[in-house]
Image (spheres, helix red, strand yellow):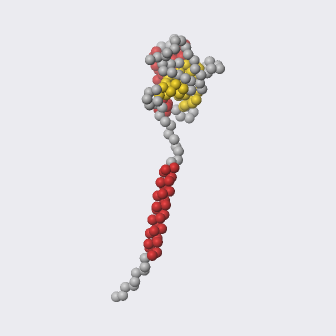
Amino acid sequence: PGSPWRGPSFTRGQVSKVARGRPGARTAVLQSSAAVHRGCSGGALVEASTGELLGMVTTNVKQQDGSVMPHVNFSLPANLLMPLRRLLEENGSLDLLKNEWEESSADAEEQALWRLEPEPLELPSRMAARKQQALDRMRQLTEEAEKAATDETPPEAPSTA
């Protein structure tokens, strides 16, 4: 396995989603539609008009049978690569890199994004609403039947002693 191409390859696409672990937090995942085939992970995700590095492609989406969906992929944002960039630019030490990675490690929300856990949907359940309506109607009918039964009961005859 690996890239079938020799040398660099380029594809076009769009950044389709910017995900954060929680509102106001740093960018944790970029989703793009650029065609990234097996063996091309680790490539740069670049803004075509400016050449700005946006991220590093890390994974494609795979179907249940294992086949790759090349137009759905995820990238590590460039801001999370800064410790590595500083190491390379400043000829830093591996100990410094290790410390910086630990300081910028992913929180629980970011880890959930990378596990590709679905976001919880807080949608009202129509089934739950229908069930509640049925229960309310059954309660109403029971009360009406009990009231009708007490209204139809003849009064007891006075006892003679």
At 46% from the left and 62% from the top, the residue drawn is: 139
- Residue reaching furthest to the bottom: 161
Who's the residue at 47% across and 28% down the image?
62
Please determine whether, in this image, residue 76 is positioned above or below residue 139: above
Residue 19 coordinates in the image, percent (x, y): 55, 31
Quadrant housing the N terminus = top left
Q: Is residue 161 left or right of residue 99?
A: left
Q: For residue 80, say whether it is visible.
A: no
Q: Between 100 and 53, which is closer to the camera in this rendering?
A: 53
The C terminus sits in image quarter = bottom left
Determine the image quadrant of residue 65: top left
Q: Would you say residue 128 is visible in this rendering?
A: yes
User: Whole-percent x and y of residue 91?
Assistant: 51, 11
**Residue positioned 50% across, 37% down in the render:** 119
Q: Position of residue 63 (x, y in %)?
A: 46, 30
Q: Is residue 3 above or below residue 132?
A: above
Residue ranking furthest to the right? 49
Q: Residue furthest left?
A: 161
Viewer-proximal residue, 154 or 161?
154
